[in-house]
Amino acid sequence: MKLTEHHRAYWRINLLLTLLLLLIWFGVTFVAGYFANELNGVQFLGFPLGFYIFAQGALIAYLVIIGVYVMVMNRLDRRYRVKQRH
């Protein structure tokens, strides 16, 4: 199957979105973890900030990443008139 420019544009945006969200995931998961000792020096709601980020903040960030992906892809599907096949 030969891809048209229409298909290429759709997949280019899809890949860029995925790359951006993976970079955010990497930052939340590994970069924040690398600085956990420094973050623990700051208190947030009575807990060390490093603990709070990994106990609550990371999970919230992951849900936001999923939500952003769903919203943007639904909008992209409507823009490029992509329909699911059943």
Image (cartoon, helix red, strand yellow):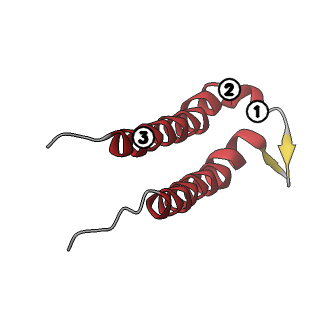
* Residue beneath disc 1: 39
Of the pair 16 and 63, the residue shown nearer to us? 16
Q: Quadrant of the N terminus?
A: top left
Residue type, numbered disc 3: Ala
- Of tags 1 and 3, the one toward the viewer is 3
Residue placed at 62% from the left, 51% from the top?
61
For the residue pair 3 and 46, the one nearer the viewer reads as 3
Left or right for 59, reference 82 = right
Q: Amino acid at mark 2?
A: Phe
User: Label 1: how many residues lie within 10 Å, few (<14), some (14-19) or many (20+)?
Assistant: some
Judge the density around disc 2: few (<14), some (14-19), many (≥20) Cα neighbours within 10 Å: few
Q: CA distance from mark 2 to mark 3?
A: 38 Å
Tell me if residue 54 comes above or below residue 86 in the rendering. Answer: above
The mark that comes first in sequence, 2 or 3, is 3
| Tag 1 near tag 2, CB within 8 Å | yes
**Residue 33 at what x, y percent from top left?**
60, 32
* Secondary structure of the residue carrying numbered label 2: loop
Residue linked to disc 2:
35
Instruction: Give the secondary structure at mark 1.
Output: helix
* Residue 37 as seen in the image, left or right of residue 69: right
9 vs 57, left or right, is left
Packing grade of label 3 (10 A; few <14, some 14-19, many >=20) is: few
